[in-house]
Amino acid sequence: MTDNSAALTAYLAQILSRFELDAFGSEAQQQLRTLLSASSFIGRTLQQQPALLAEFCHAPTLCQQLRQPGEVLPADTVLTDEAAVFAALRRYRNAQLCRILAADILQLQPVSASLQQVSQLADLLINTAYHWAYQQLSAQWGTPLDDQGEPMPLLILGMGKLGGGELNFSSDIDLIFTYPANGETSGGRRSTEHQQFFTKLGQKLIAALHQVTADGFAYRVDMRLRPFGDSGPLVLSFAAMEDYYQEQGREWERYAMLKARVLNPDGRHSTELQQLLKPFIYRRYIDFSAIESLRRMKQQIEQENRRLNRRDNIKLGIGGIREVEFIVQTLQLIRGGRIPAMQQPSLLTALTVLADEAVLTPQQAAELRTDYLLLRRVEQALQGIDDQQTQTLPQEALLRAQLLASLQLGSWTELQQQVDAAMARVHQQFKLVIDNGEEPEQQDTSIGKLLWDSEQPAEDLATQLDWLQLPDAMALIAQLQQFKQDCQKRSVGPRGRDFLAKLVPLLLHMLQQQQCQPTVLARVLGVFRQIVTRTAYLELLFENTAALQQLVLLCNQSGWLAEQLARYPMLLDELIDPAQLYQVASRTDYSDRLRQHMLRVPADDLELLMETLRQYKQAQQLRIAAADISGVLPLMKVSDHLTWLAEVVMAQVVELAWQQMTERYGAPANATAGDKGFAVIAYGKLGGLELGYGSDLDLVFVHNCDSQAGTDGERSIDSKQFYLKLVQRVLHLCTTRTNSGVLYDIDTRLRPSGNSGLLAININTYAQYLQQEAWTWEHQALVRARAIYGSPELVQQFDQIRQQILSLPRDAAKLRIDVVQMRDKLRQHHAADELDPKHSSGGIVDLEFISQYLVLAHAASDAGLYRYSDNIRILDAAAAGGLLSAEQVTQLQQAYQLLRGAGHRHTLAPATLPSLDSLQQAKQQVEQIWQQLFGVA
């Protein structure tokens, strides 16, 4: 007996002992054994609902109940009893899913039918919950009416597999809520705006499906595909939807909208919505403009496969279900505008159309259909074992035995062979979709092969490296030989050794082309050492010569970039498309790219969310550094981009933290997801839009909560304590070290009372502290402060506080003394030498103190001085106000840019740095102006 069958026999004996089966015949008992062998979920549901036992022992009764299951909410359900409604929804869901699963296990229907039935069940439960919630809210708030005086619906768009009518067994459901028009409700005890009514309705509907009770949940609801994602409103009017998709809709949102289906169509407003969305999704011509975006999406899928090594994942692994979806949806997006039959959300129907229209050959379409349905059948059986959302083939003996029982297969080897063959065929077709068709240029790698394969001494081989002096050639060969020896000691498999034997000669050819020194090979081999056991990355560099060329180029230009690539090999994926690598992004691009990355991660997988944030930040920082070191981005723009990136990432962190805290405690008093009553104030380099590589973030967190009330969740806590926990969660998300390092180091010491002060402080207390207790250096720090996240009202309040404090009248003589004393303290603390561009005399700190002094001394009479938080524009304002001459301001600005540029370059460790003479001259100019203002050196 195998481990698998032994584990199953023991489990089956245990579960059967819990049922009274004497009344059933041997055939009925055998059918029940078959079902219980395949699914713990069926066993659990039959224990919770014993009335179902008889039908699961008799296939004809099971089929009849599957077709005619009865009402979701029994006639005796008290609709005002929320708990009773939630229980009915969940019990109905569990019973009907078990019927569908049983029909699969007993092979009473094809898997395509069960996919449709799972989707129809979701439609039914969503609509039942929707109509119940609408009725409950209308009694309290009245009914929203359309222009014909009819009740106005909240239309529910089902996305993904739900939209396509091919939902998997234990799946999240992706929804978008929209309503026809704004207005006021009527006929209730109270009236409210449509937006508010439908927001409450959406929240109530989500709770009815998503909330975990004693009966479990109905569906995990994911709303992140809506316009603006988690940071956007829960519901939008048709007009707002149309504006968003026309003005801001991205290609990936078009791709997602292919699957959109109205789950509660009313024939009038739903038709209007479909007509509104159609021009955004489909173009009237063959849409080759989408190809580049789709190619990037394809690259992202391949990147994830390399990074996460999802070999046994039948959905996300190489050749998995997602690749079939990509093939079909890509062809739909490109050609659907010209072929109306393609304009529908079902993948299986679209496959038939693609063959009918000769976009795919009948053989390709049939093969994809067969392989897709096999993978979906395995997925259904896998998730049906325990009602778990998983697509990974199990390792445990019992789970393997249950999966084989569900699929009625004799051995694990048989299943593995079927799955592997199907995924291999799918991946072959996936590679052909929107392939650029470019043949790699043949390279002369004879010298590289000689050096890699030869056992000759370095002295005999050095003459082959004609671009290097003899000592350098010897050093390069020694490095190569050492690397080869290191590889022999590590578990590099045959495939990895084959790729190295092809890759290293290609690398040496590129070093010859770029006339690189041995230092560059050392840096590249530092990257190789991290990936020699990851064949996927060796394959990436060999198959994508452009990526290998970029690796050599970046390692040649920057030691820092080489270290980053060695530390985080997943960044190699960014090198595949050089045009994209050096493409200058906008602030909106950073936000949009991050949203795409986060959407691919389950909302409840905190560990993966944290990894994704870090990997995204590192990838974008790599792009910025590549554009910086190649001269595409000037210094001032580099800091702008690093600042935008940090702002976007921190906004996402706050949204994540808010979501986690409200799920645990509920929302604080008077706060909503749209107006959290919370703001993040950036000081220092982030506040001054002068962020560098590796800079930490100086942050202060404020809120406007004055209420003594608790949060509105089941585990209610004091609302002010909620904001403290929110900040602690933000800090945890940023500073916890994962495989991809920390996100940002956060420094909160600039908050009122420093380390002894509250992490989250009321905005009025913050203002009072700055007015009555703050030191001069804290007012100096405020010069560079600005809000980077928060509700408009709170941000405006902070701006007013900053303006009031900075424009206070001050004693100029005392101010000069305070500024000089603080400068001296900093210099003593850092013990800087003369080469330090930041803390040495005439360095960046002196220059920043000059601008801060000018603001504090003169802002009472010149509002232009505090308008901006960055030094360059403060100095412009000083010139405009006659505080410094135009020549002095030019000298200071040029010195500032040169000194900051030296700081950037020092981090990147490039081949060339600014000359010491130019740096010394710049610092001397700063010192002269310092002496004029403060009278001391």
Image (spheres, helix red, strand yellow):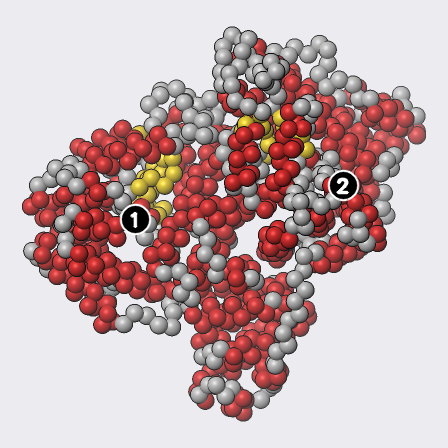
Q: Is residue 795 above or below residue 882?
A: above
Residue 688, numbered circle = 1
Name the residue tied to disc 2. 341
**Secondary structure of the residue carrying numbered label 2:** helix
Q: Nearer the viewer, residue 368 or 222?
A: 368
Is residue 660 visible in this depiction of the protein? no
Name the residue rendered at 63%, 30% in the picture. 273
Residue type, label 2: Ala
Q: Nearer the viewer, residue 493 or 265?
A: 265
Left or right, 666 with respect to 258, comes to: left
Q: Residue 227, located in which quarter of the rendered image?
A: top right
Crowding at label 1, few (<14), some or many (≥20) Cα neighbours within 10 Å? many
**Secondary structure of the residue carrying numbered label 1:** loop
Q: Is residue 307 above or below residue 84?
A: below
Left or right, 205 with respect to 479, comes to: right
Residue type, label 1: Gly
Q: In the image, residue 713 lies at what x, y percent?
A: 49, 23
Name the residue rendered at 17%, 41% in the picture. 862
Q: In the image, residue 669 lies at what x, y percent?
A: 41, 22
Name the residue rendered at 63%, 62% in the picture. 536
Mark positioned earlier in the residue sequence (2 or 1):
2
Left or right, 701 with respect to 674, comes to: left
Depth-wise, is mark 2 or mark 1 nearer the camera? 2
